[in-house]
Image (cartoon, rainbow, N blue to C red):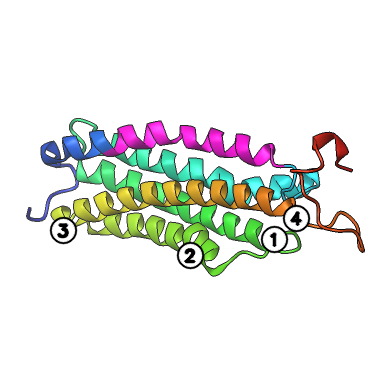
Amino acid sequence: MSAVTLGESLALHGWENFYVIVGSSAAALTGLTFIVITISSSDASNLARTPESRLRGLRAFITPIAVHFCSALWLSVLLSVPGQTASSLAICLAVTGALGVVYCVRVIRWMLEILADYKPFITDWIWNAILPTFAYLGLLAGALLLRGYPSTSLYVVGAITVLLLSIGIHNAWDVVAWTTTERHAHKYRPRHIGQPPRDDSVNGPGDAT
């Protein structure tokens, strides 16, 4: 596809099935966020024990999951609008990318704030900070490329949409897996210095202090 004028409608008819699949998946997988919140909130052994710490953990690791799913859904909607022009799509992509980068900066700040309660692993930084920031910067690049290289730009946006969907799926699984593992490990932690590790298979929930 050669260069297009800003007011020219883009030929998006070849992308319908792609964005129907991605958009439907993003909408359905948004429900994963509610499952993650339910599991993490019921975890009595979560390291974030104060309301403030729990809120910081929610903002840093769980809320972004919903944001990335919704971003993938939003991009699917944008690329499915009939008569979408190069100008309108470029503006929408640029605004979405800019807002996404600002949000990623805030997520990084929240991750730094919870260092006293939880020290993120390198994979946490990659999947929660680096890759999302790269994705939203990619949207800005796609907006800049759209007029001169529309075909390349559309493929970039498609790849970014799938990346955001993958980030959301990975982070949802990561939070659930960590929460489940942490709950299991908590049974074998000593309740007080000098006491034997706790084993809930012997002491029921009513025996916990």
Q: Are marks 2 and 4 in contact (CB under 8 Å)?
A: no
Alpha-carbon distance for marks 2 and 4? 30 Å
The residue that label 2 is drawn on is: 126
Residue 133 appears at what percent x and percent y?
45, 60
The C terminus, quarter of image = top right
Residue 95 visible (yes or no):
no
Residue 200 appears at what percent x and percent y?
76, 44
Residue 49 appears at what percent x and percent y?
79, 48
The residue that label 3 is drawn on is: 149
Q: Earlier in the sequence, mark 3 or mark 2?
A: 2
Q: Nearer the viewer, residue 173 or 54?
A: 173
The residue that label 4 is drawn on is: 188
Q: Earlier in the sequence, mark 1 or mark 3?
A: 1
Mark 4 vs mark 1: in front? 4
Q: Quadrant of residue 68?
A: top left
Looking at the image, which residue sits at the far front?
202
Disc 3 secondary structure class: loop
Mark 2 vs mark 4: in front? 4
Q: Which residues are magenta?
A: 22-43
Q: Quadrant of residue 70?
A: top left
Q: Earlier in the sequence, mark 4 or mark 3?
A: 3
